[in-house]
Amino acid sequence: MLLLVGCGNDSTAENENTTSKLDNVDFISQRHLHEKKFEGFDFETEQQWDSLNTISPKKVLLKKGKIHPAIRTFGWHIYSNGSSWKNYNFSMLWGISYFSYRIQPETGRYKTIHQWKTTTLIDSAKASNCKVFLSISNFGSENNAIFLKNPKAQKTLIDSVSNLLALRSADGINIDFEGVSKKDKTSFTKFIIAISNGLKQKNPNYMISLCLYAEDWNAIFDIPTIDLYVDFYTLMGYDYYGRFSKITGPVTPFNQSQKFGKGLKNSIQYYKNKGVDFNKLIVGLPYYGAQWSTKKSFPGATVSKFIDHPPYKRIKKFYMDSLQTPVQFDSISSSTYLVVKENDDEFHQLFFEDEKSLSIKYDWIKNNRLSGVGIWALGYDNGHSELWDLLTEKFSKEQNIDLYQDNSPD
């Protein structure tokens, strides 16, 4: 394996008209891939996940800070990250969502809720006044169609979720339905209203949040109708490039460009135009990357094969620390990447977010007075302090509120 120190951008004809255009049938998110990878494991304890995914028990020293009251920092804890939460800086989190209540679409009961009933993550979060949510997930057009046409299953789900929230004295839910078809838009809208009404009847203080796609191909979010029933939105500001991509590119391009197509700012503007208030929009950003095999070294090269979505901790340990791979920065997309030369006609390209790229996006989110930032997923940086410390530097109570400026996404 040879390291490629420099990469030219002389992509010429190969890079023309190769922006991220794809058929949404081909799209599959990193979240969905994660579920496909781990759904066969029926673990009963967090320690089993620790062993499988090499979660480090070593305590990491983090900068002290408390979340600024004007900002909502939100993170998802995935069951597969086991007890990585023991290194979370809960004082810098406004809210955390346990992922997830996986729906049985035919019945509305859960396939699994993993360690929701027993994890002491929830107790630790509450001790730091961090709000606790339960993610409700359903993946694939068929699963969504089955569930959304079944009022009885929806009633079962609402009752089940209500009991689970009460069991852990939680604060609400985060709805993550991926792959909803256009024909199911009306049913999806009715479901959002029904679960909001149903849960708030049990506890008016429950908060209902909804995951928004970076690219809403099927225009399934009827914002004017559902907005009254949704307390806040979490934009999945990632997966602009991934397993489905024809060319390499950033997981979260910041600006629109000819090379990489639409980016995070476009997604935010899209939902603003649809009626989402900035003070209700949390922008999720990735702690994982996307890696492909290519025949060329330049960003935007044609993909030979998708490899994987490595978490930040693996990128840091293997590529940056062990191999000492030079890290490069794409100013067009405000994204970090690295390139490894495998042989004369094969390269591995890896795009990801680091302190530099996240800092740019964090500042823009603050300056444009959005509700806050989200992290998919907490624990993907297990064993490292720099991303937590960046969060503290940008969003702690010590930060001056005057950092906020205009309220429009330029």
Image (cartoon, helix red, strand yellow):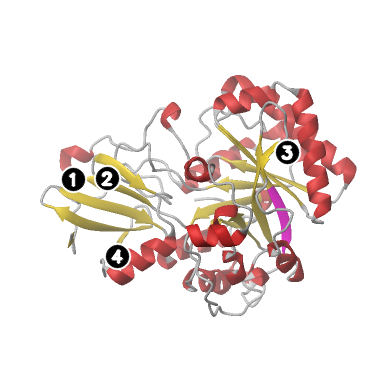
The stretch drawn in magenta includes residue 70: no
- Pick whichever of labels 3 and 4 is earlier in the sequence: 3
Q: Which of marks 4 and 1 is in front?
A: 4
Secondary structure under the numbered disc 3 in the rendered image: helix
Q: Mark 4 points at which residue?
A: 327
Secondary structure under the numbered disc 1 in the rendered image: loop
Q: Mark 3 points at which residue?
A: 227
The stretch drawn in magenta includes residue 131: yes
Mark 2, other Cα within 10 Å: few <14 / some 14–19 / many ≥20: many
Q: Quick check: marks 1 and 2 in contact, CB under 8 Å?
A: yes
Reply above or below: 195 against 282: above
Mark 3, other Cα within 10 Å: few <14 / some 14–19 / many ≥20: some
Reply above or below: 407 against 317: above
- Pick whichever of labels 1 and 3 is earlier in the sequence: 1
Residue 109's quadrant in the figure? top right
| Residue range corresponding to the magenta coloring | 130-134
